[in-house]
Image (spheres, grey):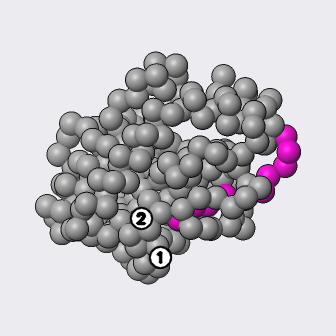
Amino acid sequence: MSGGRTIAIFGAGGATGAAAVRLAAERGLSVRAIEHDWPADAPDGAAVTHHAADVMQDDLAPLVDGADAVISAIGLGLSPQTVFDPPPLYTRGTGAIADAMARTGVRRLAVASATFVETRNIGPLWFRLSAMPALGRVYAQMGEMEQMLRARRAIDWTAARPGWLLDLPYTGDYRVTDDRIAPGLIRTRHADLADFLLRCVTQDRHVHETPAIARKEERRYESPEALAAEFG
C-alpha cells in the first residue's frame, strides 16, 4: 500500500491511535480517524477526517467501506472499576469491526494486543507481582480477541503484542520478535507501536501472526516508581 490509499483507524483519540493518524498522514495516506467522541473543534483536513462511533453499538460498515486497511488501537482506561470488570471492548468491539470489514469486503486489519497474552512471566519480579494480577482480566480479554480473529477467514489480521506501553516520542528502533517481547525488554512506546501497526498493513507484514514489539528504555521508565506514577 502506498500514498493515496485510505486507512481507517479506530481508537484514533488515544495515544497509539493519535500517533498512527499523524504518521499515516505524514506518509501520504488518507486517514479516517474514528473515536467514540471528538471535540467540536477537531479539524478535518485534506489527509484526515474525523468520525465519531461507538464500536460496540454503531454500524461501522460506512466507516470502513472503501478503506484499503483498518487499524484498531482501541483500549481501556486503567480505572479500578475497568480493570476489575472490563467491558468487552476488545472482544465485542473488535468483533464489530471485523463484521463491518467482512460486509464491505475490506480484508486487512491490524490490532493492538499485548505480549502478556502469551505469558505473564515477563519482566522483573516486582512488575509481575503488581501489574500482572491487576490487569489479568484485561489480558484475558485480549487473548479472547486473538482467538476470535483466528477464526475469521475473511480477515487478514495481525495482532501486535507490545510490552508495557510508554508515552514518549517515536524512535523507530524497536525490536520485533515472535509472539513475546525479547528477554530483557519490558516497554514499548505508543508511537513505535503505531509505526509498527502502519507498516504491517501498508507492507503486508505479519499476516495471521502475533508479533511482539519492544525496546530498551532508561531505567527511570522501567522502575517501580514509573509503574506507580502511570497506574496511579
Query: In the rendered view, does 82 fall on the left or right side of 170?
Result: left
Quadrant location of the C terminus? top right
Mark 1–mark 2 distance (CA, rounded to whole Å)? 8 Å
Q: Residue 66: which quarter of the image?
A: bottom left
On residue 158, the disc is 2
Residue 44 visible, this orientation: no
Q: Earlier in the sequence, mark 1 or mark 2?
A: 2
In the rendered image, residue 222, in percent from the top left (x then y), is placed at 78, 42
Residue in the picture at 72% in, 67% down: 173
Residue in the picture at 56% in, 49% down: 119
Q: Nearer the viewer, residue 154 or 53?
A: 154
Query: In the rendered view, does 31 fall on the left or right side of 193?
Result: left
Q: Residue 4: which quarter of the image?
A: bottom left
Mark 2 residue type: Thr
Above or below, comparing residue 47 to residue 63 in the picture: below
Mark 1 residue type: Arg
Residue in the picture at 35% in, 49% down: 145
Q: Say whether residue 30 is magenta.
A: no
Q: Say whether residue 218 is magenta.
A: yes
- Determine which residue is flagged by label 1: 205
In the rendered image, residue 206, in percent from the top left (x then y), is placed at 46, 73
In the rendered image, residue 29, in percent from the top left (x then y), is placed at 43, 70
